[in-house]
Image: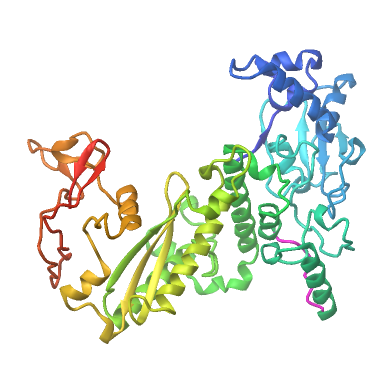
Amino acid sequence: MYHLIDDLIPHGHSPRNLQLYFFDTDTEVDNRVGYTNRLDRSIVSDLVELMSQNPYAQFFRSLKDVKFGDEFVISLNSTTSLDQRVYNLPTASQVAAIWLENDSDRVPNNRSIKVYACSGRSHNVQYYYGCYDPLQYPLLFPLGETGWHEGIDRNVALTYNNVRKRQSCIIDPTTVSSVEELIATEESMVSEGKKKRCVSCREYYAYKFQVRSNDQSLLLHTGRLLQQFIVDIYIKIENQRLDYYRTQQDQSRIETYQGLVDSVGVGATTGYDVGRRIILPVSFIGGPRDMRRRYMDAMSLVQRFGKPDLFLTMTCNPNWPEIKEFLCYNDEAHNRPDLLARVFRARVEVMKDDILKKQIFGEVAAYTYVIEFQKRGLPHAHFLLILRGKHKITSPYQSDKIVSAEIPDKNVHLYLHSLVARHMIHGPCGSLNPTFSCMVQKREGKHKCCKSKYPKSFSNETILGDDSYPIYRRRDIFNTVFVRGHELDN
């Protein structure tokens, strides 16, 4: 993901992005509304007025009175002049700007954003800039609040009045439930000499995304913009980790990896084929070594305890009361991935407690699971359980106590019947609905069929095969449900 900053002077096009702040400011609203007819003029006008309090907007608007040539460069340095410790509202004078006659080395290139008057190209904004967030997301940070940057110091004097306004945090903020607890925990850490020096990128944004009882956060209620911001922040955190491992290769004993020798061995003869390999440690989540370790661990469980007995899937339901309770204003569940992930994790932990401690399926010898995310952002977990010898499923009777592929009797299990009818009925497909998404044509000339092999055949009892999927009991009894315009049975 790249964030680019344009020149101050438009090149063959109408003003856009930051150019709108100082290029013909009298018609700024007209210029913004002119890009699309979907914008409400009154709302745009209100936002322009709101942005008049933004220090970056104030600075760029002030440039309309400055005479500068094509060679001028502005260096925005937000990490040394702004107070990074508390939520002090920045003023125009706090945005440090250095005017350069040319692209000299007087200002470190890696710690400032350079804005060119007329370079003919856009320039990248690095993730570790303090003004990365307010420049990219002015609607989320209309007052120019500085985001995370390298070197945010923890050594800050806390008081009860300013603890809620902090921009950095003392401890992992996801474990703190109240202001008093935050102060008490910090004091204990100071007394024990355990205080860290800086706040990591993950800690900082975990604090920002936290749901609090006195919810006054604009950030968490911005719909799809929050989704974009979360993805952006995750990439920022990954970039920080990757940069760290790139600079710590000496600690990873990379000399044990015969990178150059291997390149020559496979016939690499050109320069771009032979380069310096960056080795990611096993602690980097999602890296090749981490994925291989997890895979080998899972295979070792099967080698030691045998093949799994149960395969469970748990899907996040956006109608869970814990999710509904915290949806405010015009929130929609799919626009709150932070809330969905927290609630789903809590539910997964409860299910793990039922399986492992309460042993609802029997004593578990080993288990493994993976959490995936659907396109709508809903997480779901897949569990593989290996039961101990005496608890293994060896008969159809044991299987029927755990798995049911039949519609529950409405007169006996009304609530369970409603859940199955709402969430667990496939289709209808086949002759009832040939255009359903599951219908595929496997061979040319053949009729379309369901890729999940529905409808299933009736079976009066469960049949367990040695090397095949079980055929579950589906009796031809009068239990039906009306789903999507059709009456369906077992």
Q: Is residue 156 above or below residue 108?
A: below
- In this view, the residue farthest toward the bottom is 390
The kind of secondary structure the magenta stretch mainly shows is: loop
Q: Is residue 101 among the parts visible in the rendering? A: yes
Question: Residue most toward the front?
Answer: 411
Indicate whether residue 176 is drawn in magenta.
Answer: no
Q: Nearer the viewer, residue 287 or 222?
A: 222
> Would residue 360 be found to the left or right of residue 340 on screen?
left
Q: Is residue 387 above or below residue 205?
A: below
Please indicate whether residue 273 sits to the left or right of residue 458 in the image: right
Instruction: Give coordinates of residue 223: x percent, y percent.
Output: 59, 38
Tell me if residue 197 is in the magenta stretch: yes
Q: Residue 414 falls in which quadrant of the image?
A: bottom left
The residue closer to the viewer here, 94 or 378, is 378
Across and down, in percent, residue 440 comes to 19, 40
How many circles with numbers are drawn on the protein? 0
Residue furthest right in the image: 93
Position of residue 355 in the picture relative to residue 48 (left or right):
left
Between residue 18 and residue 114, name the one nearer to us.
Answer: 18
Q: Say if residue 197 shows up in the picture.
A: no
**Based on the displayed image, in which of its 4 quarters is residue 106 positioned?**
top right
Q: Residue visible at 89% across and 22% down? A: 66
Which of 260/94 is in front? 94
Compared across the picture, whether 167 is left or right of 213 comes to: right
User: Going 22% across and 41% down the picture, which residue do you hit?
Assistant: 428
State how the image is colored: rainbow
Residue depicted at 19% across the width and 35% down the height: 433
Residue 441 location in percent, x, y?
Answer: 15, 39
Range covered by the magenta-colored residues? 193-200
Residue 262 sits above or below residue 438 on the image:
below
